[in-house]
Image (cartoon, rainbow, N blue to C red):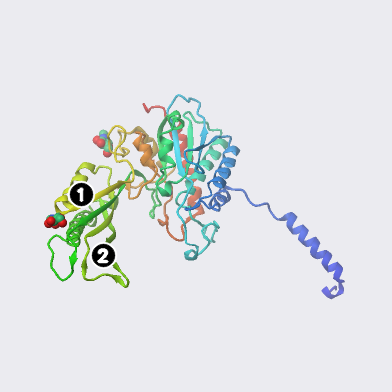
């Protein structure tokens, strides 16, 4: 019986080498599957403030080429590419279907994560960890994989199908979707219906969103006589501001009470949250405690619902929250449109008046899935720019039985949930792109 000691050093070396060679020859090539393609996209760091858009676009473009899709890279701002993919329909005169997804993501704090945020680590239970797994790189790959599967079944669309992969959604979309919808390239698409991102559902049913809330940044400012802190002043800047803060708090409470009573979802009321207070005369060790400041300011994050009357809101701010008669002024920075080009609220009907809604719903139920009651999204997405053009848009990301982790540490998505989503999009794409009855 040969013992290892009976071999010479050189023959041991030889066997080691042979073994290594054999091992590398039989080792499978890196698997290429929908999951690994999702992981490859997640590993491209497109987080702000320095999103690597070029790598993301070249990766997605290569995917599109493998599917024979037409691809155009558009620039509405330097270094901010927008990738537009097209699967032409057999009747290009019909309004088309647009599927939107943003390329960028919010930053991550790696130290707070179980697995590095750009590693796309797949845990034993199938959870894929990564910034963008939920928001919203999953849907971009699902759109493409659904097309791959439909092509394998020799499906061909009647209406043209477009996929837009847009920059800068997480910083407001001003150089992305906002400029895209105003471009001649967009007008030429003749979009009849669009899908954009939604949110995960912790329950066994998908969520769907028919509107976004619109943020207003509100700054209110008060003036008053300055002077020595030993006197009591009437109408000082601080006193004026504090009165307003109380009025705003009462409004906030009245809205919040409706939610607490179960009469509305959080996103169905106007929210207002104080974000900063600014006053006081800075001194060497903090603030001068014996000087009444002549100016005081507060900032609020307001979120309006699509049916909020903006004029009524402005009146409330001007008369109650920052009245000029109390030496106050205000500034509103609107973070997006509130009405479409026809002056209608930015919302997509989820009833029989919208034929696309019926097609959407049917496509979900036909694969044995359930939808929860349509909701307003508490935050904002690029969908608002499409709705402003009068296009019906639903916010939808097929993630059920999934914790809501967008913008959170340890954002992840289960592989099985991701795969199920592909099947859902196959159903959606085939139904929407062959729908014949919509007038527009
Ligand atoms: C507004 O400011 C003026 C000038 O400082 C002052 O005379 C007046 O009393 C102030 N009014 C109120 C309501 O505070
Ligand atoms: C459908 O919903 C829209 C928007 O919510 C509403 O204005 C309209 O009255 C509804 N139509 C029907 C037929 O229920
Ligand atoms: Zn998003």
Q: Nearer the viewer, residue 431 or 135?
A: 135
* Image coordinates for residue 178, horizontal then vertical, percent: 40, 39
Closest to the camera, between mark 1 and mark 2, is 2
Is residue 270 something that shows in the picture?
yes
Image: 300 above or below 143: below
The residue tagged 1 is: 317
Residue denoted by label 2: 280
All told, the count of numbered labels is 2
**Badge 1 local density, few (<14 within 10 Å), some, or many (20+)?**
many
The image quadrant where one finds the N terminus is bottom right
Q: Nearer the viewer, residue 435 or 80?
A: 80
Q: Residue at x 37, y 39 (%)?
A: 385
Question: Quick one: SS at disc 1?
Answer: helix
Q: Position of residue 418 (x, y in %)?
A: 49, 50
State how far apart marks 1 and 2 are (Cα): 24 Å
- On the image, which quarter does residue 5 sit in? bottom right
Going from N to C along the chain, the mark reached first, 1 or 2, is 2
């Amino acid at each position: 019986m040969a013992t290892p000691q009976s071999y010479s050093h050189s023959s041991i070396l030889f066997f080691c080498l042979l073994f290594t060679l054999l091992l590398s020859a039989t080792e499978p090539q890196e698997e290429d599957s929908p999951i690994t393609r999702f992981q490859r996209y997640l590993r491209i760091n497109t987080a702000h403030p320095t999103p690597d858009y070029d790598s993301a676009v070249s990766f997605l473009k290569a995917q599109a080429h493998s599917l024979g899709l037409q691809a155009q890279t558009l620039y509405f701002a330097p270094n901010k590419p927008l990738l537009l993919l097209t699967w032409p329909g057999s009747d290009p005169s019909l309004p088309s279907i647009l599927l939107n997804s943003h390329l960028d993501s919010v930053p991550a704090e790696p130290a707070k994560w179980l697995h590095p945020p750009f590693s796309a680590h797949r845990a034993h239970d199938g959870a894929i960890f990564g910034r963008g797994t939920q928001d919203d790189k999953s849907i971009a790959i699902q759109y493409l994989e659904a097309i791959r599967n439909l092509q394998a079944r020799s499906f061909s669309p009647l209406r043209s199908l477009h996929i837009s992969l847009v920059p800068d959604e997480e910083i407001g979309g001003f150089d992305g979707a906002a400029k895209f919808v105003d471009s001649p390239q967009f007008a030429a698409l003749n979009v009849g219906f669009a899908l954009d991102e939604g949110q995960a559902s912790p329950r066994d049913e998908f969520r769907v969103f028919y509107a976004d809330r619109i943020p207003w940044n509100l700054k209110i400012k008060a003036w008053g006589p300055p002077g020595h802190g030993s006197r009591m002043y009437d109408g000082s800047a601080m006193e004026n501001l504090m009165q307003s803060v109380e009025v705003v708090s009462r409004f906030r409470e009245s809205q919040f009470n409706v939610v607490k009573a179960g009469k509305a979802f959080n996103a169905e009321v106007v929210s207002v949250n104080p974000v900063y207070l600014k006053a006081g005369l800075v001194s060497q060790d903090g603030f001068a405690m014996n000087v009444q400041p002549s100016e005081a300011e507060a900032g609020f994050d307001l979120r309006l619902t699509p049916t909020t009357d903006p004029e009524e809101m402005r009146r409330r701010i001007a008369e109650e929250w920052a009245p000029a008669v109390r030496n106050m002024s205000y500034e509103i920075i609107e973070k997006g449109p509130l009405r479409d080009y026809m002056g209608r609220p930015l919302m997509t009907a989820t009833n029989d008046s919208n034929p696309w809604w019926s097609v959407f719903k049917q496509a979900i139920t036909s694969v044995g899935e359930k939808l929860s009651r349509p909701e307003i999204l508490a935050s904002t997405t690029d969908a608002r720019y499409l709705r402003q053009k009068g296009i019906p848009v639903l916010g939808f990301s097929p993630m059920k039985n999934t914790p809501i982790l967008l913008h959170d540490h340890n954002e992840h998505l289960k592989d099985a949930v991701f795969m199920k989503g592909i099947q859902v999009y196959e159903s959606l794409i085939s139904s929407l792109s062959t729908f014949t009855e919509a007038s527009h």
